[in-house]
Image (cartoon, helix red, strand yellow):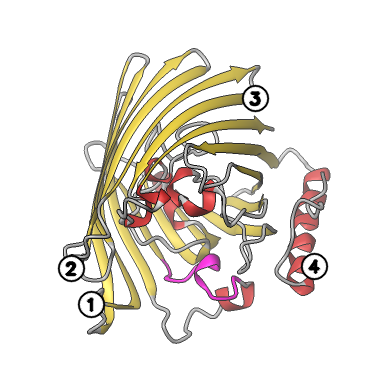
Amino acid sequence: MTPCSRNFSFMSHADAGRSCGLAAIALLAASSATAALDVSGGVTGVTLYPDDARIEDDRTFSADLNLEWTTNKGRWLAYVEANSSLNKAGASTLVAEANADSGTALDPDRNGRVQLSELNYQFRLAEGAALTAGYLDPSSFLDRSRITNDENVQFLGVSFVNNPTIEFPDYTIGAAYERPMRGHAPQVKVVLASSNGLADNPNLSYSQLIQVSEQDKGAFLAAGVGWLQEKQLIRVGAWRNTRPHSTLDGLEHGRQNYGVYAVYGRTFGRHGLNLRLGIADDEVTEGARFAALAWRLAIGAHAIGIGFAHTGLSDPFSDPSRDDTRQAEVFSRIAIGTKMHITVSAQRIEHSGFVSVASDARSSVRIIGLRFHYAY
């Protein structure tokens, strides 16, 4: 399948040309690979079957291509991805928490497209430290764990991929510093980036992306420390988003958002456990408190997982039609060879988008999922 196949529709002819041109350049580079070029990626298809007839069955498709060029002093990374268009009445749209693999490459009309999502260079520094600068994904440096974060082969639910209380920008312009553990000194990570990534701008365009000093934009700053051992992982950090925010009561504008987070992971033989916690400013954030617990059992290349997550509605809300969001997921992943996985999952989501009106399908929904992933 070519990057601009008939399965994708685009924002405009100009943006289509740019996106397809970028993808073509990446694929051309891959075709002329040398020993210093590493090519990887995958394709994923997801089908969701909700138990409420008011929410339609959903089928989404995504594709990823990673190109890494290793140099004497560092590494170039180019990441191209594609998403199929979203069904406005489908489960991935109406119950957004259900499918973390959908909607990462869309135009303003919710149509799928091919896009360049990352292009950056990592400088190798002394004693294992590194500085990455360019067009990057801030979430890939923070809030990471060993048994979550990968919607292609692990949990599909959004609550088990990234902490929703952290106001991460989408793919954006910025820099990240990483220093590994040194003796008892922890790993250190610091990210400074534009507050508005590609999908955070009204037109979802590259021209808006690079205009980092526009009105109503700011900076995203995060710092975290971590202790990584063979069987245990601990991360704690804090972040601030200086983009002007309005308070939830609408009485004040120009506030900044901020918060803290923590990640704990532990392995026991074939078992893995992950705990995630987060708190944000409840005067500007709808969901300001978050906790998630996930467990995974590895059976050779196969796996079984169970996760529970709770996102607390901020205190300023006293509307009886809104309530905390709760999400649970169980999955069974079957490996077929070394590159292919098929996963069956079951999710229950209560108060999707904080909606708690009993007559609304989003108040309580069960969703069966079938996911196919092929890595190359």
For the residues marked 4 and 2, what is the alpha-carbon distance in whole angstroms? 45 Å
Of labels 4 and 2, the one closer to you: 2
Residue 253 x, y percent position in the rendering: 28, 84
The residue wearing badge 3 is: 340
In which quarter of the view is residue 263 placed? top left
Point out the tag, 4 or 2, that comes first from the N-terminus: 4
Mark 2 vs 1: CB contact within 8 A: yes
The kind of residue on which mark 2 rests is: Pro
Residue 366 x, y percent position in the rendering: 42, 36
The residue wearing badge 4 is: 17
Q: Is residue 44 above or below residue 285?
A: above
Q: Kindly state the secondary structure of the residue where label 1 is placed.
A: loop
> Viewed as shown, does residue 288 lie left or right of 54?
left
Q: Residue shown at 52%/47% (left/top)? A: 55
For the residues marked 2 and 1, what is the alpha-carbon distance in whole angstroms? 7 Å
Can residue 83 be found in the magenta stretch?
A: no
Crowd class of label 4 (few under 14; some 14 to 19; many from 20; radius 10 Å): few
Depth check, front residue: 23 or 181: 23
The residue wearing badge 2 is: 316
**Quadrant occupied by the C terminus:** top right
Can residue 357 be seen here?
yes
